[in-house]
Image: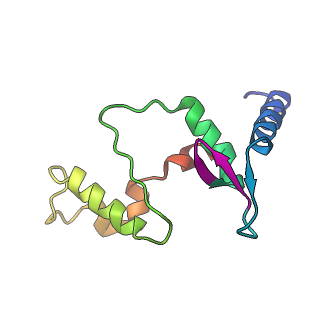
Amino acid sequence: MHNGVAASAADDIAELAITSLPLDMRFRPFHLRQYGGFWLLEEFLVVVLAVHSVFEPRPSDVLLASFPKCGTTWLKAIAFSTRNRAEHPPCDLNHPLRHGNPHDVVRYLEMAFA
């Protein structure tokens, strides 16, 4: 949105849509809302709605999914290394994972919209 009024209206619509979703408060201090058959943190729903409104997957896309604290960083490193092995063989001294974090080379999809 280009102006503050339109952005505010869009935020109000998103908030109204989010507050109409089923709510679960058993896991305090987290408020979970059910969207698309999944329970998500309320604070992430605006970003999820933005992703769903514009993301068009391609046949070549690879999406990684993992639970928090279950090896996400390791999974990203393995996936990046496997997918980019021709361009960055393990012996490559300039391999991106030698100089950076796996989260730098495999970004969170939601972060592009935050």
Q: Which residue occupies 75% across, 70% down?
A: 28
Task: State left or right for residue 56 relative to residue 4.
Answer: left
Q: In which quarter of the image is residue 2?
A: top right
Task: Farthest residue to the right: give it.
Answer: 5
For residue 93, which quarter of the picture?
bottom left
Q: What range is drawn magenta here?
A: 31-39
The rendered magenta stretch, by its main secondary structure, is classed as strand
Q: Please state if 70 lies on the left or on the right of 47 as rendered.
A: left
Q: Is residue 96 above or below residue 28?
A: above
Residue 45 colored magenta? no
Please give the name of the residue rendered at 36% of the width and 31% of the height, measured from the top-left corner: 58
The residue located at (63%, 54%) in the rendering is 40
Q: Which residue is rendered at x = 50% and y = 33% of the image?
A: 55
Instruction: Name the foreground residue: 105 vs 31.
Output: 31
Between 69 and 87, the one lying in front of the other is: 69
The image shows residue 21, relative to residue 1, as above or below, that is: below
Count of labels in the image: 0
Q: Where is residue 96 in the image (x, y as percent from the top left)?
A: 30, 60
On screen, residue 26 versus residue 54, left or right, reads right
Say whether residue 79 is left or right of residue 25: left
Give the colouring mode of the picture: rainbow
- Where's residue 27, x and y in %? 70, 69
| Residue 54, picture quadrant | top right
Name the image quarter holding the N terminus: top right
Position of residue 60 measured from the top left corner of the image (x, y, whole percent): 29, 36
- Image location of residue 88, percent across then percent down: 19, 55
